Image (spheres, helix red, strand yellow):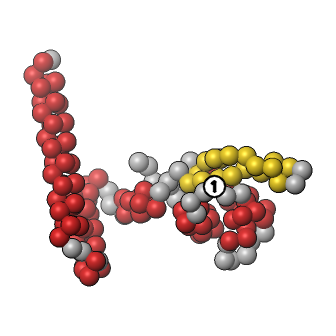
């Protein structure tokens, strides 16, 4: 997953789209946005988000005598959080960065972490470890076959 840099305006629009269960038109977003921008600024930001593959046109709808696009996010909030995190760590720092991230999350989420959460994390870690071991074994066998 590559990093997608979003402007403050684009990020504000993404937050609106993430909160809504259904696709929105530019006018819907205009009505919901806290900091009032012109409808043209919102349309420009939506075009930029389309170019960055952060959103997609989900549908078309009739609005009076014109047709309007309805947008939905492609990037999830979790995807964006991971992109934000990954931006600050190079490949060399990745192992340290991941460990630090999890450690920091435990500090901030202390009251929300229970046994079930830790069990789920352990399962995810075990699954990733198995995947990495299988990849390593496959690569090793591929080298032997050559």
In the image, is 81 to the left or to the right of 5?
Answer: left
At horizontal 67% and vertical 72% (from top left) the residue drawn is 33
Residue 49: image x %, image y %?
Answer: 61, 54
Give the image location of residue 28, x and y in percent: 72, 64
Q: How many marks?
A: 1
Question: Crowding near pointer 1: few (<14 within 10 Å), some, many (20+)?
Answer: some
Residue 133 in the image: above or below residue 115: above
Q: Secondary structure at mark 1?
A: loop
Which residue shows up at 68% across the image and 77% down it? Answer: 35
Q: In the picture shown, does residue 87 fall above or below 114?
A: above
In the displayed image of the protein, which residue is found farthest to the left? 144
Q: Is residue 51 visible?
A: no
Residue drawn 10% across and 22% down? 144
Give the residue furthest to the bottom. 111
Q: Residue at x 24, y 80 (%)?
A: 110
Front residue of 120 and 90: 120
In percent of width and height, residue 90 lies at 32, 56
Q: Quadrant of the C terminus?
A: top left
Image quarter for residue 93? bottom left
- Picture coordinates of residue 15 (x, y %)? 56, 67
The answer to whether residue 130 is visible is yes
Residue at label 1? 23
Q: Nearer the viewer, residue 36 or 66?
A: 66
Residue sticking out furthest to the right: 65
């Amino acid at each position: 997953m590559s990093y997608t840099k979003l402007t403050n305006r684009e990020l504000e629009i993404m937050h609106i789209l993430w909160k809504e269960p259904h696709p929105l038109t530019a006018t819907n977003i205009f009505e919901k946005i806290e900091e009032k921008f012109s409808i043209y600024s919102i349309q420009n930001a939506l075009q930029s988000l389309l170019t960055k593959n952060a959103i997609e046109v989900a549908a078309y709808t009739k609005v009076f005598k014109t047709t309007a696009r309805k947008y939905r996010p492609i990037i999830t909030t979790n995807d964006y959080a991971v992109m934000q995190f990954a931006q600050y760590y190079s490949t060399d720092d990745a192992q340290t960065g991941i460990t630090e991230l999890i450690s920091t999350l435990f500090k901030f989420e202390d009251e929300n972490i229970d046994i079930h959460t830790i069990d789920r994390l352990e399962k995810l870690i075990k699954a990733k470890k198995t995947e990495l071991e299988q990849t390593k074994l496959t690569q090793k066998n591929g080298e032997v076959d050559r």
